[in-house]
Every structure is written in structure tokens, then in C-alpha cells.
């Protein structure tokens, strides 16, 4: 079984629902038969990620995330980074430092190291542009990204090397998203994920941050058993996210199996009733969604 629990479902500026990061749990038996999953993966870990995990660990079904009152960071085995906005990577410094100073062999300077997964085009800048400032200084020496993580660098141009698996069964394939576009589509690296259960052939789609680009991934969304698509509720010219009005143009059967996430704080103002009628609904944080039985 593979389950997905959002640490948050809000957009970059949301304050009520935390930021859009997700905890994937792979189970050989299932959550009712195991105390903890066999493998765990975060899809992104933004600034609000640590406080969200801190809350989630008090839920009885997520007790394995608790270590005597603090977040049990070594329970997080892998982190996939879709792109370097702070709502997707802002929690990595805390995770890395906790794994070094609270859960690692501090005196030997050895951290508990989860796997860090992204494409080489993200990985090449992640340290120098984002993480180095807070993580390079260690008592007595300078540290590098590989002091904190085992690095898995994917190659988006090579179909053989743009994916990884959980439990040798669930395959995660990255695809580029049209999020920022400095000059052209896809010129600023950013990704979504298509997940396949290789045993049954079923799939699940996770859009990542993207402008409306449905023709490019319509096949993935059409054939998936469950979709998660980012959504911007407020209308705006030339947005870097997908407007709700654009998502409403999707085929009715696709909308019915699509949960919306990365939305603003006014989702429950009464103005967006169409979401519950046309779509699977607004995704909720801290609720386990079953991707594959
Ligand atoms: Zn975002
Ligand atoms: Zn973004």
C-alpha cells in the first residue's frame, strides 16, 4: 500500500493550512497491521514543514514520527525536492541540523543521513544558492551537502534515470512543469511526479507547482486513479500557478478524481463551492489518502 498525507495544502503565502508538502508512506502490510511504514518520502519540505510534522506526530496513527516530544526526523528516509522555493525547501535546514545534532553522532560529526532526491539541474544549485548559508558551518570544519544527505541525482532527459522506486514496487517518475518561465517554458527547473504501482499498472498524479499546462499531462491525469493538482483561487493575469477557472475546463470525469492543493486561505469563504461539486474536493492536511491498496 502507498499512502499520501499532506503536511500542508496551502500556497506560498497561506497561513491557515501550512505549505504544500506531502508525506508518502509505503507499507508492505498496511497501516492497520504495522506501527510504522517500511519506507517514507517527503515530497518537498517547506518552511512550515517542521511545525506541521510536530503536530502530526501527536496523531495516534503517526506516533512513529514522535521521539520523546520532538519530531523523530530519522523516521523520514527520503526527501524529494520539486523546486527551490522556500515553501518547498525551507524546512530542510532544520531537518539536516536535527539529524546531525539531535540524532547523529555529534562528536564524530556524522549525521543520520536521509536520501535527498532531485534532478541534477536542481541539485547543482540547491547547496550553493539555498542551503549552504545555514549548513556549511560545523564546529571545527566546513560541511558539504553530502555530510547531511545521501544524494540521488536524477536526469530528466534520460527516461532510464528520471525515476526511483519505493519498496521496489512504486515508481516515481519526474516530469518538468511550467512554473516560472524566465524567458521560455521549462527554463527554470521545477517538477511534478507521476507515481505508478508497477504490480497493478495503476497510477497517481501529483502536479507540483505549475501554470496550467493540461495538454502536456492530460494523458497522465486521464489514466490516473487519483490526481492532486495545485490551484490558485484568486484570478490574476499571467499567473505562475494554475487558476481554478482553468482547472474547471478539464473533462468532468478527470475533475471528479482530482483533489486540489496549494490553495489560498480563503478557500472556505463560500466563493468556491464549485470545487466540492465538480472536483474530488479541496485536499485536507494531515489526512491519509490511499494511492494504491
Ligand atoms: Zn509552492
Ligand atoms: Zn513554487
Image (tube, rainbow, N blue to C red):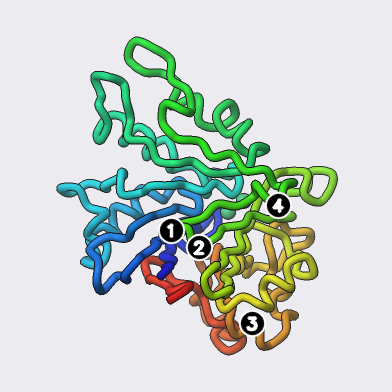
x and y percentages locating residue 108 in the rendered image: 27, 19
Indicate if the residue with disc 2 has its beta carbon within 8 Å of ligand 1.
no
x and y percentages locating residue 152 in the rendered image: 54, 40
The disc at residue 255 is 3
Is label 2 in contact with label 3 (beta carbons under 8 Å)? no
Choose the circle earlier in sequence order: 4 or 1.
4
Q: Is residue 120 visible?
A: yes
Choose the circle earlier in sequence order: 3 or 4.
4
Residue found at x 43% / y 15%: 142
With 9 as the anchor, is 25 left or right in this view?
left
Q: How many marks?
A: 4
Q: CA distance from mark 2 to mark 4?
A: 16 Å
Is label 1 in contact with label 2 (beta carbons under 8 Å)? yes
Q: Nearer the viewer, residue 91 or 24?
A: 24
The disc at residue 167 is 1
Q: Residues within 10 Å of mark 2 (few under 14, many from 20)?
A: many
- On the image, numbered disc 2 is attached to which residue? 170
x and y percentages locating residue 260 in the rendered image: 56, 72
Residue found at x 50% / y 25%: 132
Label 4 SS = helix
Residue found at x 73% / y 67%: 217
Choose the circle earlier in sequence order: 2 or 3.
2
Q: Residues within 10 Å of mark 4 (few under 14, many from 20)?
A: few
Q: Image height check: is 167 above or below 118?
A: below
To which quarter of the image does residue 250 belong?
Answer: bottom right
Label 1 SS = loop
Is label 3 in contact with label 4 (beta carbons under 8 Å)? no
Q: Is residue 15 visible?
A: no
With 55 as the anchor, is 20 left or right in this view?
right
Label 3 SS = helix
With 157 as the anchor, is 72 left or right in this view?
left
Amino acid at each position: 500500500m502507498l499512502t499520501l498525507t499532506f503536511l500542508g495544502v496551502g500556497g506560498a503565502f497561506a497561513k491557515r493550512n501550512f505549505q504544500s508538502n506531502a508525506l508518502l508512506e509505503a507499507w508492505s502490510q498496511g497501516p492497520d497491521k504495522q506501527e510504522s511504514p517500511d519506507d517514507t518520502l517527503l515530497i518537498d519540505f517547506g518552511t512550515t514543514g517542521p511545525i506541521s510534522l510536530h503536530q502530526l506526530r501527536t496523531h495516534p496513527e503517526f506516533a512513529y514520527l514522535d521521539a520523546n516530544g520532538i519530531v523523530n526526523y530519522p523516521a523520514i528516509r527520503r526527501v524529494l525536492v520539486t523546486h527551490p522555493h522556500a515553501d518547498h525547501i525551507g524546512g530542510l535546514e532544520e531537518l539536516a541540523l536535527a539529524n546531525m545534532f539531535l540524532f547523529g553522532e555529534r562528536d564524530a560529526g556524522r549525521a543520520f543521513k536521509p536520501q535527498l532526491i532531485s534532478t541534477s539541474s536542481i541539485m547543482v544549485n540547491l547547496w550553493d544558492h539555498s542551503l549552504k548559508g545555514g549548513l556549511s558551518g560545523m564546529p571545527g570544519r566546513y560541511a558539504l551537502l553530502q555530510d547531511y544527505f545521501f544524494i540521488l541525482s536524477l536526469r530528466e532527459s534520460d527516461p532510464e534515470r528520471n525515476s526511483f522506486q519505493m519498496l521496489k514496487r512504486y515508481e516515481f517518475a519526474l516530469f518538468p512543469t511550467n512554473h516560472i518561465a524566465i524567458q521560455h517554458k521549462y527554463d527554470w527547473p521545477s517538477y511534478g511526479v507521476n507515481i505508478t504501482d508497477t504490480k497493478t499498472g495503476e497510477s497517481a498524479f501529483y502536479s507540483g507547482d505549475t501554470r496550467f499546462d493540461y495538454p502536456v499531462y492530460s494523458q497522465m491525469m486521464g489514466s490516473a486513479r487519483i490526481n492532486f493538482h495545485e490551484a490558485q483561487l484568486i484570478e490574476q493575469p499571467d499567473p505562475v500557478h494554475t487558476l481554478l477557472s482553468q482547472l474547471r475546463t478539464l473533462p468532468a470525469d478527470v475533475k471528479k478524481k482530482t483533489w486540489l492543493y496549494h490553495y489560498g486561505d480563503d478557500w472556505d469563504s463560500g466563493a468556491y463551492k464549485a470545487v466540492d461539486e465538480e472536483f474530488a474536493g479541496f485536499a485536507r492536511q494531515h489526512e491519509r489518502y490511499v494511492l494504491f491498496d
